[in-house]
Amino acid sequence: SAMYRRALKLPVTRRIEFAELITAIEEQGFIWGPGHEHWLPQVVISGYGYINYDAVGKLENLDNFLANNIEPILRRTIPTPEVIFPQRKDRFSGGNEICGQLYTDQLRNRVYRLYKIDFDVFDYRAALPKL
């Protein structure tokens, strides 16, 4: 959106390439303020160091996380036993192919350096680039 582009001093009238976004974040660093919350590390915006979470769900395992962590809590706290989570249907979005086109090895390493704290804290070793 224009707000996010302005926050990073990027043009609002043309398409911004992913590498340009990463360059702007690298140049400005992480800033806490309006328009910047979209790309702050998850450790920062979640308050992870200050809040003692019982569990952290990951999108790639969302179904299991909901069934094993959230559903039991809801069943204990909601009077009706009708807690139903919709089943996620696997859909082909083409996202893997798009990521393969966007992420060169160099860009993957730059993103990793920016978000290293998230990779480490949330245990994303499988996603680590070959540095």
Image: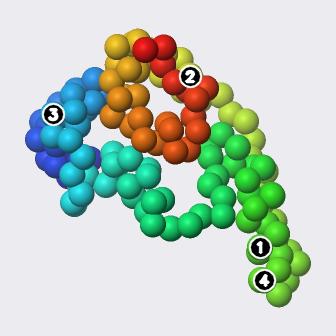
For mark 4, does the 10 Å Cα neighbourhood hold few (<14), some (14 to 19), or many (20 or more) residues? few
Indicate left or right for 107 with 83 as reference: left
Three-letter code, disc 1: Ile
Can you identify the residue that label 2 sits on? 96
Residue at point 56% right, 67% down? Answer: 52
From the viewer's side, name the closer residue of 60 and 126: 126
Label 1 vs 3, first from the N-terminus: 3
Q: Which residue is most to the right?
A: 81
Residue at point 85% right, 83% down? Answer: 80
Label 2 vs 4, first from the N-terminus: 4
Q: Is residue 116 above or below residue 41?
A: above
Q: Which mark is residue 50?
A: none
Quote the CA–CA distance across marks 1 and 4.
Answer: 8 Å
Residue 109 lies, in percent from the top left, at 38, 20
Label 2 vs 3, first from the N-terminus: 3
Three-letter code, disc 3: Glu
From the viewer's side, name the closer residue of 43 and 25: 43
Helix, strand or loop at mark 1: helix
Residue 58 lies, in percent from the top left, at 62, 46
Label 2 vs 1, first from the N-terminus: 1
Quote the CA–CA distance across marks 2 and 3.
Answer: 28 Å
Residue 121 lies, in percent from the top left, at 52, 45
Can you identify the residue that label 3 sits on? 27
Three-letter code, disc 4: Ile
Residue 98 visible from this viewpoint: no
Residue 131 sits in quarter? top left
From the viewer's side, name the closer residue of 122 and 1: 122
Can you identify the residue that label 4 sits on? 78
Residue at point 56% right, 22% down? Answer: 96
Label 4 vs 3, first from the N-terminus: 3
Helix, strand or loop at mark 2: helix
Helix, strand or loop at mark 4: loop
